[in-house]
Image (cartoon, rainbow, N blue to C red):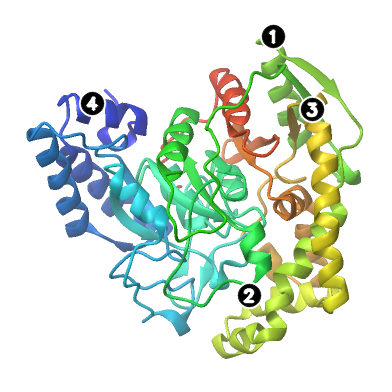
Amino acid sequence: MTALYALPATEIAAKVRSRQLSAMEVTEAALARMDAVNPAINAVIKPLHEEARAAAREVDAKIARGEDPGMLAGVTVTIKANVDQKGHATTNGLVLQKDLIAEVDNPMVANFRKAGAVIIGRTNTPAFSLRWFTSNNVHGHTKNPWNPAITPGGSSGGAGSATAAGIGAIGQGSDIGGSIRYPAYACGIHGLRPTLGRIPAFNASGAERDIGGQVMAVQGPLCRTIGDIELAFEAMTRPDPRDPWYVPAPLKGPEAPKRAALCVRPEGLATVPEVEAALRDAARRLQDAGWTIVELDSLPPLREPARYQSQMWLAGLQRGGMAMAEKEGEQASLGVYRHMLAITPPADLNTYQDALTKRAGFLRQWMLFFEKYPVVICPVSAELPFPDQQDTKGFEAFQRVLESQLTQVGLPFMGLPGLTVTTGVVGGNIPVGAQLLAGRYREDLLIEAGRVIEAAGVPATPVDPA
């Protein structure tokens, strides 16, 4: 019999709604799992036992009264520490923000509550939510439950590690440069970066984001099953007037040909054999299910969009961001900022305007491409999950990390969606998978393809921390 903490969200919601399980039973099982395994991985930096029990009681009370408890009735969820959750610090991994207490929920957190989810804890993120590794001076170091020698990913490393270890059925993450897709990849689960505007978000605790963050950053789910990705995504998309970028687009678009482009080395990426094998495996799974697979040597631009993404991301450093990083004094993030400035100097006004101007052209090329190939199969990373803290080993090591993550960094500049689908494990304890891309608001195509790939076999989770 599957342990309650290991049940997928789809099954939890169905069983709670039908009274086969109570929300309290599910919550107690998730809290017990968290207490048992979190000390080894430090994924949840603030457990919320009593708040979770109160939320579970409310779900059960609604059901007892004959009311609709919501589509996520009793489903256990974790929230990233860079997101406003009423009554808790939005630390963003910073000592400087350890007392920045949110007075209201971020719209996405509110949507989880409206859907009947039970929030059981807040998850770790690197300082400034900056890195593809997860450590900071306020909450410490998060480990990968598969293998403590490799990164759990970042910046949603706590969410990825917690979800893979069975702490909650859904981990909320955010993505401006791979921060959902990479932790999912590194932790052997799935992660959806939605289209810009799909899921409303806003942190009232802080200042308005720079325009780069506004047009590139999104919220999304990390889950152990594709069915849970679909369910969580739908629950998170409820409208909220606080996000002016929100678009009430339909969750399902028109029928599209079952045709996918496979590109192993976009923009000349030095994709390692293990990743190439995973990509070809994913393509074969789709082909066996009746999809047409066309292998291509190239895709529309990613490298130039990635350069502009970095310039827009770093623009805030000139406006007080670097001074704040120096005041925080967290050496890993400070080192990354300095490496990034060496590679991509801050943009002047004309360069910044050029970036925003060229964005439309890049997006146009991609949208025309998706007319012919509705889905793309490409690497999440050119390499297997890195040794933990690899980006702190000097400038050359950082350059290697950044180059390998090209597909993660280039995509957000266009606001496009991407889905990490885990496919297997290398050497017994190093997860690997593939990234799927599609056009704006076509998460349904990603989920459809992801479901086919998943059906042919994925790593068994939850995993007990090594």
The kind of residue on which mark 2 rests is Ala
Marks 4 and 1, how far apart at CA? 33 Å
In three-dimensional space, the C-alpha distance between marks 3 and 2, rounded to whole angstroms, equals: 42 Å
What amino acid type is highlighted by mark number 4?
Answer: Lys
Q: Which mark is residue 371?
A: 3
Location of residue 126 (image quadrant): bottom right
Q: Residues within 10 Å of mark 1 (few under 14, many from 20)?
A: few
Categorize mark 2 by other alpha carbons within 10 Å: few (<14), some (14-19), many (20+).
Answer: many
Checking the image for residue 149, the label placed there is: none
Q: Is residue 449 above or below residue 405?
A: above
Where in the figure is residue 138, as x and y percent of width and height?
44, 77
Q: Earlier in the sequence, mark 4 or mark 3?
A: 4
Q: Residue at x 65, y 10 (%)?
A: 289
Q: Are marks 4 and 1 in contact (CB under 8 Å)?
A: no
Residue on which disc 4 sits? 15
Q: Residue at x 86, y 24 (%)?
A: 295
For label 4, the SS is helix
Compare marks 2 and 4 and give the one earlier in the sequence: 4
Separation of marks 4 and 3 at Cα, in angstroms: 40 Å
Residue 379's x, y, as percent?
74, 39
Q: Are marks 2 and 4 in contact (CB under 8 Å)?
A: no
* Image spot of residue 32 (x, y percent): 23, 48
Crowding near the residue tagged with mark 4, few <14, some 14–19, many ≥20 C-alpha atoms within 10 Å: some
Can residue 131 be seen here? The reply is no
Mark carried by residue 290 = 1
Q: Nearer the viewer, mark 1 or mark 2?
A: 1
At label 1, the amino acid type is Gly
Image check: 15 left or right of 248? left
Q: Earlier in the sequence, mark 3 or mark 2?
A: 2
The amino acid type, in three-letter code, at marker 3 is Glu
In terms of sequence position, does the residue under pointer 4 or pointer 1 come before the other? 4
